[in-house]
Image (cartoon, coloured by chain):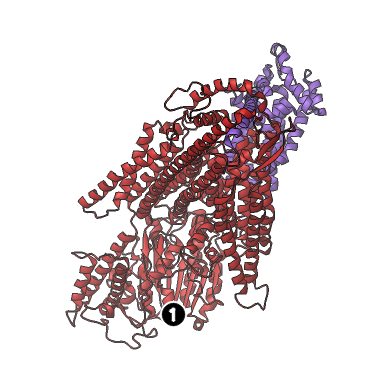
Chain colours: A purple, B red
Amino acid sequence: MPLVDPVTMSSTTIAKAAASKAQATSSKAASSSSPPTYALLHPVQIRQTPLAQAARHALPAALAGLFAVRFRALVADPVSTMSTTLPLTAALQVAYAVLCLPVAGSQGGGGGAAKGARKQHKARPGEGGGGGGGGGGLGLKKRSAEGAGPSAVVTALLSLLLALLVTPFLHAAMVLFGAPFLTHGAHTLLCAAHLAVLALFPLFYVHGVDGPAWAAVGGFGAPLDETFGGLVGGVVGAWLGAVPIPLDWDRDWQRWPVTILCGLYGGYVLGRVLGGTLVWGKRF
Amino acid sequence: MPPPQPPPNQKASPPPDYKTIASQFAAAKRTKEAEDNKTKKKNKAQASSVAVHNPVEPQPQLQQEQQKAIITAREQRRARLEAARKRAYQSRWAWTASFWVWLLCVHVVGIAYFTSGFLLTRLVLEEKSACDAPPYESGSESSSQSSLLPAWEGRGTVDGGCWHPRTFKRAVVVVIDALRYDFTVPVEDDAPFHNAFPFLWETAVREPGRAFLRPFIADPPTSTLQRLKGLTTGTLPTFVDVGSSFSGTAVEEDNLLMQLRDAGRRIVHLGDDTWEALFPGYFEENLSRAYDSFNVWDLHTVDNGVIEHIFPLMDRKSEWDVLVGHCLGVDHAGHRYGPDHPEMTKKLRQMDGFIRDLAATMDDETVLVVMGDHGMDSKGDHGGESDDEVEAALWMYSPKGIFGRTKPEYVTPSATAKTRPVNQIDLVPTLALLMGIPIPFNNLGRPIEEAFAGAAGSSWANLAAAERVAAAGIKRYQTAYFTARGIEDSAGPGSPGELWDKAEALVSQGKGQDWPAIFTAFAAYQEATLQKCKSLWARFDLKNMVIGISVMALGVIVLLVYGSRGDDDDVIEDEELDLAEKSLELQGVKTDVEAAPSATLDKRLVGAALLGFLPGFIGGVISSFVSGAGDWYRGSGIAALTSTAAVLVSMYEVHETVLKIIPRTLWGWMAVVFTVSQSVGFASNSYTIWEDSILLFFITTFGFASALAALRIPSRADRYLAIYHSVVFVLLGRLASFSKLCREEQMPYCTSTYYASATSSTSAPWQLLIPFLVCIVLPSILKAYLEPSRSYEGLAPTWIGYVFRTGLLMSALYWLLDAADNGNWIPGLPDKTLKNISVYTAQMVLGLALVAGTTAFIWAPPCVSIVTSASPTDPTKAQVAILGYGNAHGARYLLLPLNLVAACVLLSKPMGGGALGLMAWQILALVEMLDLNNLPATCSPIGPVMLALLGSFYFFKTGHQAALSSIQWDAAFIPLFTIRYPYSPLVVALNTFAGQILAAAAVPLLVLWKASPRKRGLLDAVSRRALAGFVVYFAVECLATMAWAGYLRRHLMLYRVFSPRFMTAAVVLLVVDLVGILVALAGVRCNTVAIGEVFGWAE
């Protein structure tokens, strides 16, 4: 014997169904229009100054060169090599940010005319971030957005600090992927630091701690540009870097985390270059 | 009775498809809405999980009678419709199940075919040779019933020589692992591995009576373990030596060491610990020293250990009779550096000095044998069957001076291994006859001529006698083997039988015989027999392998197409539409339920399968008879091929083509990458060995991707919930990964945690706490996952909160009792007390989980409860709310996998029980993640594939590896005192494949979780989306391991890595198929029936 009479039950289900349908359509509408921040997040443009244009090509090459030069030492002694290379990498990244990237809150960055034209509808991400984060750092960045010069350096240093603060979480993520838990702590931490400085630092520099922008980046909703392309390339490269580790070739370069770092640098440089050129502005 | 109100537009649109009903209903609804608008009330807070029922407003008295009549009529009609729906559902279910049974048959045929061509088996005979029963006495027709030699003193005793006069009292056997023949002979070049070990060659040339050196050909596989088996039993290795038990690696066949031990000889072993594994308990404990054989980086420990301990023993010859020394340095130098390296020179020079010193300590009673068990290839590795790998060296030495050459030119050892080689199995009869013990029963070798030819090389009678007694042993073994196997021994010219008769005829000619001719005749017999056995045991049947792979591949394609998502098969999810259809039916618009499609695709496919099967089977049988091959079973292989082909054609006719299997979303591609990359990885032994880490990597990848994708969820609460579940999912996976049982090949990069230590198979005391933790935590977790959908109702609180928890508690107690029993924690208890209590506890748990659990699942009402409350808008009216409505299917189905969890937790070791608890939690997190990320099994294969990955992952986390040695046979004794069929194999299967079985049982959850009773097409979704996607993963793995094992059949890791992985994949596929039919599909049927009884049939 059924507990509920289906006939009468039906009338209530209409109500419920109508409600759920309404909800569904509204949520669908929301989902199509919900990421207003996504839609407004524009791909980062490299400054138009000759120096910036030269640096955008020279610096990835320098990064790749740095890694190639340090590779032997890295295989021989990963920890000390990674720790000595990290400041160099960071310096290259800071130079890249200061020279090429628009500082957080100023979005348009670079050249005068383009910046002026875009400024009107570009303001929002920064403001949204201000509402979400409200941190002193961001305020500072906003204020200094127009100025470039020293304030860009300050932003860069703050972003570097943020990237290093995120490093322990990246370390934890690597452990979750199967990195050694109790041993090789320094190896993993330094590897995570390289990942943060390479892939996350530029994003901190251009987005600050703007929550919706980061949600767009994390949810693969951001448009591809040098910063986001670098992140995707670096992460995918590091992920693929794990592939050769199990092979029984007994090579020194199979040591943790040489292959990860290899994939990270390769993927990052490739992702950054492609993101700034071929696939610029595209979305997933 | 005519319908009371004529429904709008009741055209007889023959198959009333959803869209026309939708428009009809829209019109009806508009008018209806106007009149009874106020009867609709919403309860927004409970909208997702609770259905609200408002009674219709009271009608005027006048209409009531009429109304009542209408209701009665409707009631009857409704009952009829329900019954028809139920019948239709059941027939649909039967067709679906038939399809899966057919698929199971296809998998069985494919696997059986491949296996018959690939896994060569040899029957291990139990018989042992006995000293007082020489083989020629049982050979009845033979004219001379005794040895060719005149009777000797002590004949028939070990001291005098059982079958042949004894020559030596003691033997020192030194195995120099990977001693290739060319290392020991002069070669004119400067290679580091040449001319560094000249002692053997020098002595053979300088003192031919005291020493000889010959090439020593190994039978592949050239791995040390298989070689030692061959060197002691005298038989050829195959992958599966079917003996009385699979457990352990110990040699069970008759062998040299067994004969020596049975004759009371004291055996000492020094070096490679493989000997200890093969011959446990054979060696004098206080004199023997075993060293780890696996650390190839260490060149010296083993060698130095052997050298250090062997010389003191030479001064105490009275304390032992046989000494086995096994040096690994040369082999390790090869593995680590390759032969072309100064370290190899050093190692060979060290061996040269060692043997030089050792030879100096020999006396007349002792024979010294130095040999390589295999060679090495140019990179220093071995395992395969290339010339360099099989060509080892054999050197025998004794100061007694009894070795001879039948021709003077034989004094100088051959320059290469291509001339005058001996087989490694020949050492077995040689040593046996020299030491006076019987030749092991299974021996196929022949005596080495130098050892019996006499110092002058002219003792032909002795040589012929030795040859004959060995040949007679072979004959006896062959007869026994063919009888046991039921094979006819072939006759005819050139056959072993004919050669034997010829040789015996020569013997029976009487005295004054032609000894060299007799010797040659028996040697020819041995040669022919060996060839025959090699062809029996060592040839892959490529044709069968290809048929097997083809059947599997077609099966995978069928499954992919079956499970692919069509464009037009969206089940329209619209409750209003359902409702409209229902009321139309009730009003008699829809004539009968038969119009509803019953068993569409499955029925068609099963028909096609049968149609394709018959001609294939008949054709196969006829062709095999016509060709005279007699292998009528080939019919089944061809039948499977034609049957799958017919199904594919049938699918093509309904537009289910291969093109549809290409994924269209990133998630779909992720599923493909996970499955395919793993399958490709099975081509590499490294990726096969590290499969557990790779699975963790994939699982974590999915978890992170899901957390990132959750950022796109519009609703803030859902977003955080999805991120939370993703994080939990990842953390649980990593936590479970700490439960490890490493396989040998993972050393030294892996630490086992599954047991108390690497050398024990019992749990550490702290591990006993894990099952208690599971008992406390897991039911609460389940409750926490059911409560958000208000589904912790009905039977759930009782079953999960009390019964399930009791089962887990008793499992925990079982393991406590077991540990107490093993550790003898309570001294003074009568024998077996604890064992008795624990076994009965285990039986109760299994009874509770499997018998009571199944019964409860079948009869349980849905996990919902009905509450009546005042309507929020009109307090005078009652409102009925159904708690748990939104997850009615999922919550009830969950009880079924839980029963299996309880059984498997008991049958796994404490660590494994903990892992399975984590698995149950992770599965729930997975279904929540899929639900929140809007990735139902109906539109993305990622859910089923992730579930399959979890199943494989927990196979490793419950203390298993893809190796025969990791099977926990002792699990059979958890609920039983002795082996009992069929329970013991079932228990071992539940222990071994707990992960995959649980995953397979949880497959319907992917569809049923958060499915309300009104949801349609559940069976179709479970079968075609969830189960198909899940089984595809395992079928692809099976196909890949099969193809790789077949392709790499000459690979040196074949027997260690590829074959066991293929066997695991094959068994897992069949287990998953079976569980899919018997648990998942049957469970869905029970569940739907139970829900349908209460809420009416949605399908």
Residue at figure coordinates x 33%, y 56% from the top left: B539
**Residue B1003 shows in the view:** no
Foreground: B837 or A32? B837
In the rendered image, the vertical position of residue B350 relative to residue B135, given as above or below: above
Foreground: B614 or A250? B614
State the image coordinates of residue B46 (x, y, percent, origin top left): 69, 35
Q: Disc 1 marks which residue?
A: B262
Foreground: B118 or B871? B871
Q: Residue furthest bottom?
A: B153
Q: How many marks?
A: 1
| Picture quadrant of residue B226 | bottom left
State the image coordinates of residue A111 (x, y, percent, origin top left): 70, 14
Q: Which three-letter amino acid code belongs to the residue tagged 1?
A: Asp
Which chain letter goes with mark 1?
A: B
In the rendered image, the vertical position of residue B447 relative to residue A258, given as above or below: below
Q: Would residue B31 be found to the left or right of residue B232 on screen? A: right
Q: Residue furthest front?
A: B62
State the image coordinates of residue A62 (x, y, percent, origin top left): 64, 30
In the rendered image, the vertical position of residue B725 relative to residue B686, given as above or below: above
Q: Residues within 10 Å of mark 1 (few under 14, many from 20)?
A: few
Residue at figure coordinates x 32%, y 45% from the top left: B613
| Picture quadrant of residue B835 | bottom right
State the image coordinates of residue B609 (x, y, percent, origin top left): 35, 42
**Residue B413 shows in the view:** yes
Q: Would residue B568 be found to the left or right of residue A101 on screen? A: left
Q: Would residue B323 be found to the left or right of residue B735 on screen? A: left
In the rendered image, the vertical position of residue A189 relative to residue B831, given as above or below: above
Under circle 1, the secondary element is helix
